[in-house]
Image (cartoon, rainbow, N blue to C red):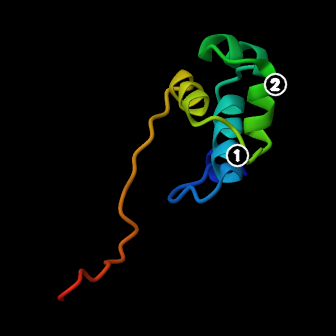
Amino acid sequence: MSLDDLLPNGNINSVSDFGALVRLHRLKQGITQADLAALSGVGIRFISDLGNGKPTIALGKALKVAYGLGLEMQVATRGWTQKRPGD
């Protein structure tokens, strides 16, 4: 099984999911935690915490790390609709 087979395709529902995605992309690209930290302007500890799914990571820093790996974030509606008053 390759790293491509392990990369999540679809929804990211937790910090752990996002951290796993970042960790796998980092490994796929052959980048060390130290190199990614320097590239992203964050500390090595943050890279470790993110990769381990620490639930209190800072979103701004996480986006910097994703950008450093060549990833981008998109947000989409889950597909359910909410009734408006009067409908």
Residue pointed to by mark 2: 45
Q: Residue at x 36, y 57 (%)?
A: 76
The amino acid sitting under disc 2 is Arg
- Examine the image and state in which quarter residue 30 appears: top right
Query: What is the x, y in percent for residue 6?
Result: 67, 51
Answer above or below: position of 86 versus 77.
Answer: below
- Crowding at dot 1, Cα within 10 Å, few <14 / some 14-19 / many 20+, comes out as many
- Circle 1/circle 2 CB separation < 8 Å: no
Q: Position of residue 66 (x, y in %)?
A: 55, 31
Total marks placed: 2
The extreme left residue here reads 86
Identify whether 70 is placed above or below 73: above
Quarter of the figure with the C terminus: bottom left
Q: Which is more foreground, mark 1 or mark 2? A: 2
Figure quadrant of residue 46? top right
Label 2 element class: helix
* 42 and 66: which is toward the camera: 42
Pointer 1 residue: 20
> What residue type is disc 1 on?
Ala
- The residue at 73%/48% (across/down) is 55
Query: Would residue 63 be found to the left or right of residue 87 on screen?
Result: right
Q: Residue 60: percent from the left, percent from the top? A: 55, 30
> In the structure shown, which secondary structural element does the residue marked by tag 1 occupy?
helix
